[in-house]
Image (cartoon, rainbow, N blue to C red):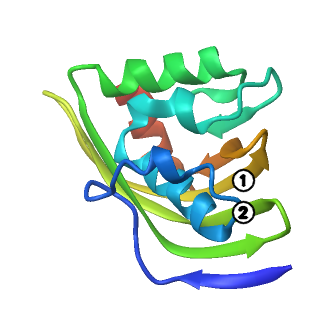
Amino acid sequence: MEFIVINRSFGRDSKNLVNEINLKSFQGAMSALETFYYSFLTINKIWVPHDLIQLNNPLGGIIREIDNISNLYYKIFTSEANVWVEFYDIISYRFNECVVFAGREKGLFSSDENIIELNIRTTRFFAYINGSWGQVHHHGSIDDPELLKKYQAAIK
C-alpha cells in the first residue's frame, strides 16, 4: 500500500479525461477522479456498472445501482439551483488495483431563496475493473447538524 498527498484540488476547472481512465496506473485513477468533478452529468462513465455500487450522502442517504445514483445527481444539477463543489485536502490510499481518495469538499448551493456554503467530508473508492478505472463507492457527510438540516431542507 502507498500513501500519497494530492497537492491539488478538483472542481470547476477539472478536465474531461475519460479517454485516460483505461490506464492501469495511478494516473488512470486520478483521471477518473478528475473526470467525475469535470461534470457530474458524466456519472455513467465513471461509476462501475454494478447493482452494488454505493453512494452515501447527506441528501439521498444510501443509494445503490448506477441508474439510481445518476437520477439523484441529475435532479440536483439540472434543477434551478446552482451547485458546485471542489475536492481538496486529499490523501490517496493506493493498492494494486484500488485507490481510495479521502478529503473534503467545499462549495456552494444557491437557489432563489437560499445560499448555503457547503463543507463535506468525502471519500471516493475507485477500482480498476474490466480495463478501466471506475468508482464503486462514495461517502460524503456534513459534520455540522445545522448546515445539514439547512441543506436538506433547501434541496427538498
The residue to which callout 2 is attached is 100
Task: Residue 59: tell me if it is visible.
Answer: no
Q: Quick check: 156 left or right of 124?
A: left
Q: Quadrant of the C terminus?
A: top left
Q: Is residue 34 above or below residue 4?
A: above
Give the residue at x 72% y 21%: 65
Q: Quick check: 2 left or right of 29?
A: right
Q: Considering depth in this image, is 127 or 89 the residue closer to the camera?
A: 127
The residue tagged with tag 1: helix, strand or loop?
strand
User: What label sits on residue 125 in the rendered view?
Assistant: 1
- Tell me the CA gap for discs 1 and 2: 4 Å
The residue tagged with tag 2: helix, strand or loop?
strand
Q: Picture coordinates of residue 15 (x, y %)?
A: 33, 54
Q: Considering depth in this image, is 56 or 154 the residue closer to the camera?
A: 56
Q: Quadrant of the N terminus?
A: bottom right
Q: Residues within 10 Å of mark 1 (few under 14, many from 20)?
A: many
Q: Picture coordinates of residue 110 (x, y %)?
A: 21, 38
Q: Picture coordinates of residue 86 (x, y %)?
A: 37, 59
Give the residue at x 57% y 50%: 21
Check disc 2 and give the amino acid type: Val
Give the residue at x 78% y 38%: 130
Q: Earlier in the sequence, mark 1 or mark 2?
A: 2
Q: Quick check: 29 left or right of 12?
A: right
Task: Residue 19: tell me if it is visible.
Answer: yes
Q: Considering depth in this image, is 40 or 110 the residue closer to the camera?
A: 40
Check disc 1 and give the amino acid type: Phe
Name the residue at the left extreme: 112
Quarter assignment of residue 68: top right
Q: Residues within 10 Å of mark 2 (few under 14, many from 20)?
A: many
> Do the residues bearing badges 1 and 2 touch, measured as CB atoms within 8 Å?
yes
